[in-house]
Image (cartoon, rainbow, N blue to C red):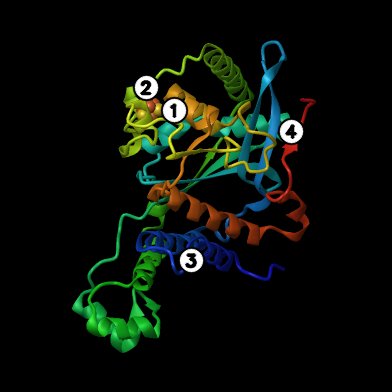
Amino acid sequence: MNEISPLEAALTAIDESCPDYADERARLVATKCRGLMKGYNARWLSADYVPLSIEDTLVSPLFNPATQRQSRRFKMAGKRDLTATESGRRVLFDHKTTSDSIEDPDGTFWRQLAIEGQVDHYLLLSLLHGQKFAFAVWDVIKKPTISPKKLTKKDRAAIASLGEYCGSQVSEAAKKWVINNDRETHGLYEVRLANDCINERPNFYFQRRTVSRMDYEVLEYAEELWMHQQNIGETRKNERWVRNPGACMMYGSPCRYLGICSNADTPDSDHWTRRENSHEELPSLDGDGKDVLTNSCIRCFQTCRRKFYYRYELGLKKVDEEEREPLFFGHVIHAALEAWWKAKLPLENRHGDNSESPVNAVGNY
Ligand code: SF4
């Protein structure tokens, strides 16, 4: 028996990611994650997936599928969110958060995912480690669109007299708060959000979709990956790190390297430091990681070669970069999901939880 429930583990992980002294923006993110995890727990606790491994990093040599030749320079790597079993079948999980609508199975979010290479990357990497999966699961959480709001007179009266809000009991502090205040505290907002996630709109917030990949599709990805490593190798050799102006404002905010690209800054200024490992999400990787291809770095190369150069070749990182809110949200919810699944890990599978162990590797590189 595990000593702590998955929900308790998730909420603890959120609180540890965002201590009391954190600023208002960070505390609101943590509150949203707490509400979401209560909904996630209600939605999926009884689902029939038994975790096998959580957040494990795999590294493999990279092969040309046509000739079986091994790349002399590049390896491939990735961190799998979760592997699990369902009715005796081995399943690969990938957690995602999004601001897009996820209720419509034919919506743009799911259409875009259908051509996303991430699942193929992990399936190929797993195959090279001798692991084949029956299917993959996209485990998606929609970010809340509701925010703390003004309380109605009726709400304030119910909270003050009954200690009740959105069907839940609230704290004594909240009861006192509403006597002289008409806005939700973070605690009251969390109660309303959790109620929305659990009772009102669970399908709005949580969707899982299974993804089957035929062997030929994984092979097709292996062929593309080989082409990517060739392109990256040639671009590096010829120093052709061309800019893509169409990507400078992607995702609604300026690229972090815009100052350098527009000659307002230089990579050597004291605004920048260098990463020791280009792939910070894989801390157990040996060396500087420059010859390791992950799904993220391939996407970066496809988006803008100059960005790839700054990010992965030079390893440039802003000295005082504030973690952007979407990234911070992703960081906190990911920590919560990891803790939730770890608390569900059966004792006999704990050997498979190698998140703290050195990188797994195959081959003779
Ligand atoms: S690195 Fe690419 S995306 Fe970023 S500012 Fe320069 S040209 Fe634009």
Q: Nearer the viewer, residue 213 or 290?
A: 290
Give whichever of discs 1 and 3 has the lower sequence position. 3
Residue 45: name its quadrant. bottom right
Compared with 66, 14 (above or below) is: below
Label 4 sits on residue: 129
Report helix, strand or loop for mark 3. Answer: loop
Is there a contact, CB below 8 Å, between mark 2 and mark 1? yes
Q: Which mark is residue 244?
A: 2
Query: Within 8 Å: ligand 1 and the Cβ of disc 2?
Result: yes
Report helix, strand or loop for mark 4.
Answer: loop
- Most distant residue in the left direction: 153
The verdict on label 1 being within 8 Å of ligand 1 is yes
Numbered disc in front, either 4 or 2: 2
Q: Amino acid at mark 1?
A: Lys
Which residue is located at x 30 percent, y 89 percent?
Answer: 161
The mark that comes first in sequence, 3 or 4, is 3
Check disc 3 and report the residue beneath it.
19
Disc 3/disc 4 C-alpha distance (Å): 39 Å
Disc 3 marks a residue whose amino acid type is Pro
Residue where numbered disc 1 is placed: 307
Label 2 near label 4: C-beta < 8 Å? no
